[in-house]
Amino acid sequence: MKSLLFITLFFCIHAQAGILRAPKIIARQLKAKLYSTERALTQYEQSHTTYIYKDTDETAYYLKRIRLLVAPFAAFKVPMLEIKIIPKIEFRWTRKNPAGWRNYNNQRS
Amino acid sequence: MKYFFILALLSLNSYASTGKVPTHWMSSENQENNFLTSTNEAEMTGLETAYLKILNVNQDLFKEISLDAKKTWSLQSIKTELALSAEGTIGVMGAGGEAALELVWIRKGTSNGSSSFVENSAPEAEEIQMNGEMNEAAILREITPIVDMALSSQRSPKRQKVLQRLYSEAIKFQKTIRELESTPVMGPWYAYKYQLELYVSAEGDVLFFEVGNAIRLRLEWWRLKKDQAPLIQSPFAPTELSENAKFIAGIASDLEAMGNLNFENGFKLNCLKVGVGSTVKGNLLIVKSKASATGSIFFKRDDISQESFALPNLMEEVSSYGMIENNVIKQIPRMSFRSGIEKAAKIATFFAKHAKTSEESKFELRVIETELELFTNGGIGIVNVEGSAGLTLFATRNVTI
């Protein structure tokens, strides 16, 4: 019984330590993904034509937002087990409307 | 061995505490009372505690992220997903499955009203190409760099396959927006953007829903109008509307019928996302997310008085909505759909009530998305991780999403 208690305590300490480190590990992965994606978007904006899909004289459609869901994870070992924490996090990049255009709404002015 | 698993769960409690939503939140039952209070008060307290802990962990994660507002494309927000187990336990989204609640953290510093990214125009020097219709060359030029960006972390991606899938969906999108354009704005709720969604597996395969460690890419085409656009058109008579225009106008009418609910912390219920597909004849219908279609229409509500519009309810013309699930089309009663939307909105008030943001955080929780399962009897409940969402309700504060 004593040995079971000891193993249990040992397990808890390891698990708790891993859990406390998890947010930092995940944040580091998020920053790396964010950096690589922003670099790609910078290249995109330097060499890209903006397309507007016009459906009437007064209205149009425009690719305005990109959303990318990633799954960073933190894994740590405790006696006889490996625990993974995998939160799902989505980055959203939005660009401004082209000059002379604004978001559609039903306002009268 | 089982002790270790129990202890592991207890330890994980400090990262993402556990709490359960009331059973009737996830079922198709539409109980008139008792949405926000359970007969078991301890259950509601546990849910509140778990939710607050998850909010706090998220704020800690985002402290280190840097921001640059000068770029054309700029990081505007970060979303985290929460899931419900089949038993209703809430937790951070891990393995594949449907999220029940999505929390959008908007960067601080955006002004009251809408984000500056949304309202301002790009510089006039920007090269703009007007296209009457989407064509293959234009679409591919536009989406190829985005797909490359999304796949940058994948091993051996099947790039051409992803591009082809996106292209074929974009062509479907073009047909759908023609229908949207023929739908007059007849009330405060109207369709304002279209979203394409797909998953790409680690092997580069394009998937319709999430499996394992697939990444998810969503592209949004927004409806714009010219700065000097004329007054909106007058409402059409129901007899003048196409079947698809009635479908859109019917949902807008159902949203308006739920009235004004009291949301705390400055939140408002002002957006709904509906997965849409079309029949062989081209009629729009609702799709549940594990069906074949990956497009969604977003409805939005502006802050204008209801008296500004003569909103037809179209109850005689539209008594049910078509819904496709597992390639089978079913008809769901419209009155049940209406009641279900109201129930879902009341549930969303709980999550808005507890949405607090710490002052040190660079991001503020401004959008709460409640993912909903649509049952064939028209009832609506929060989706669990094993279910398939068809609708999403958005509660927002001080932001245009």
Image (cartoon, rainbow, N blue to C red):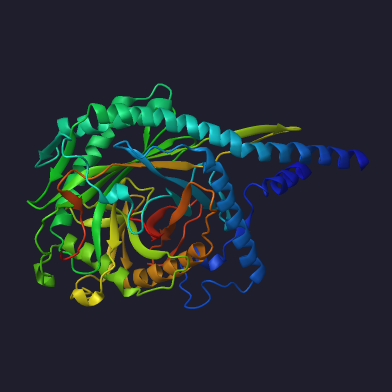
- Asked if residue B23 is positioned above or below residue B142 in the image, the reply reads below
Residue closest to the eye, B97 or B332: B97
Question: Disc count in the image?
Answer: 0
Residue closest to the eye, B27 or B360: B360
Is residue B170 found left or right of A76 in the rendered image?
left
- Asked if residue B237 is positioned above or below residue B19 in the image, the reply reads below
Residue closest to the eye, B115 or A17: B115
Q: Position of residue B123 (x, y in %)?
A: 20, 39
For the point 61% across and 53% down, which residue is it?
A: B53
Residue closest to the eye, B392 or A56: A56
Residue B273 can be seen, yes or no? yes
- Quadrant of the image occupied by residue A64: top left
Which residue lies most toward the top here? B156
For the point 57% across and 66% down, which residue is it?
A: B22
Q: Position of residue B101 (x, y in %)?
A: 48, 54
Is residue B282 found left or right of A6 in the rendered image?
left
- Asked if residue B185 is positioned above or below residue A21 in the image, the reply reads below
Residue A73 can be seen, yes or no? no
Which residue lies most toward the right here? A2
Which residue lies most toward the left here? A57
- Asked if residue B231 is positioned above or below residue A17 in the image, the reply reads below
Which image quarter is the N terminus of chain B in? Answer: top right
Q: Position of residue B245 (x, y in %)?
A: 17, 62
Q: Position of residue B124 (x, y in %)?
A: 16, 39
- Quadrant of the image occupied by residue A86: top right
